[in-house]
Image (spheres, coloured by chain):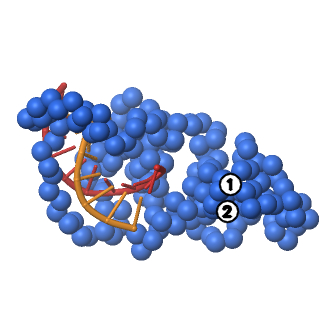
Chain colours: A blue, B red, C orange
DNA sequence: CCCTGATTCGC
DNA sequence: GCGAATCAGG
């Protein structure tokens, strides 16, 4: 994939909206978050409003340079096990995007008509310590329910909703 | 562990 | 110009 005018345009738009590089990469498709970040820098639209402080990082010696073949090095070097970023592209990605925006701007917002594949839509009384407590619909309504997917050993949400709930908050904290 | 953007540098 | 690898941090 190359950076066509349209794709650059989309990049600018999404970046201005405050989306993260990986989210933008997921929507554009065919690019990694690194590609997005790299492009953002080249376009000189990095700052996104604030973030004036440039701590002036120093880079270590990169890659191959004088790395005399130590057997263990190659294996241990890879700290990011190759992962296709948030691979899901298409309708699902768009739905996710919608939810993230909602969560980012409003504490309480009924997430209607958003389909989560693993949702079991449990009633409040059906929840256990291990069920996802992500709310579906209007809490004041009768058909209000919770996601109910397996939430793991700790945490109130399943992995899917944990990301929706927690990531935007962490991101906001820093930008503020 | 998950993620974020920033930087470097071989291509 | 591009973006993977890496860094530094939450």
Q: Mark 1 near mark 2, Cβ–Cβ under 8 Å?
A: yes
State the residue in front, A122 or A43: A122
Residues tagged by mark 1 and mark 2 found on one chain of the structure? yes
The subunit carrying tag 2 is: A
Residue A88, picture quadrant: top right
- Compared to A54, does C7 lie above or below? above
State the residue in front, A110 or A173: A173
Instruction: Give residue A46's position: percent from left, percent from top.
Output: 30, 57
Instruction: Give residue A80's position: percent from left, percent from top.
Output: 37, 42
Numbered disc 2: secondary structure: loop
Residue A72 in sight in this render: yes
Seen at 27% across and 39% down, the residue is: A77
Q: Which residue is mark 2?
A: A156
Instruction: Give residue A87's position: percent from left, percent from top.
Output: 52, 36
Instruction: Give residue A162's position: percent from left, percent from top.
Output: 60, 57
Q: Which residue is mark 1?
A: A151
Real-space CA distance between mark 1 and mark 2, rounded to the nearest whole angstrom: 6 Å
Seen at 70% across and 66% down, the residue is: A109
Number of labelled discs? 2
Mark closest to the chain's N terminus, 1 or 2: 1
**Could you tell me which quadrant the N terminus of chain A lies in?**
top left
| Lateral position of residue A53 relative to residue A113, left or right | left
């Amino acid at each position: 994939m190359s950076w066509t005018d349209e794709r650059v345009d989309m990049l600018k738009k999404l970046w201005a909206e405050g989306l993260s590089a990986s989210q933008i990469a997921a929507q554009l498709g065919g690019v990694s978050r690194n590609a997005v970040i790299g492009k953002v820098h080249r376009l000189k639209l990095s700052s996104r409003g604030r973030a004036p402080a440039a701590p002036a990082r120093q880079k270590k010696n990169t890659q191959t340079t004088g790395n005399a073949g130590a057997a263990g090095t190659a294996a241990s070097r890879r700290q990011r096990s190759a992962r296709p970023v948030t691979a899901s592209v298409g309708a699902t990605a768009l739905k996710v995007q919608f939810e993230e925006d909602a969560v980012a701007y409003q504490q309480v917002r009924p997430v209607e008509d958003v389909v989560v594949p693993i949702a079991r839509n449990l009633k409040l009384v059906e929840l256990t310590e291990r069920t996802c407590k992500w709310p579906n619909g209007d809490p004041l309504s009768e058909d209000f329910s919770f996601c109910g997917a397996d939430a793991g050993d700790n945490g109130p949400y399943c992995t899917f909703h944990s990301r929706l709930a927690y990531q935007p908050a962490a991101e906001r904290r820093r930008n503020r």
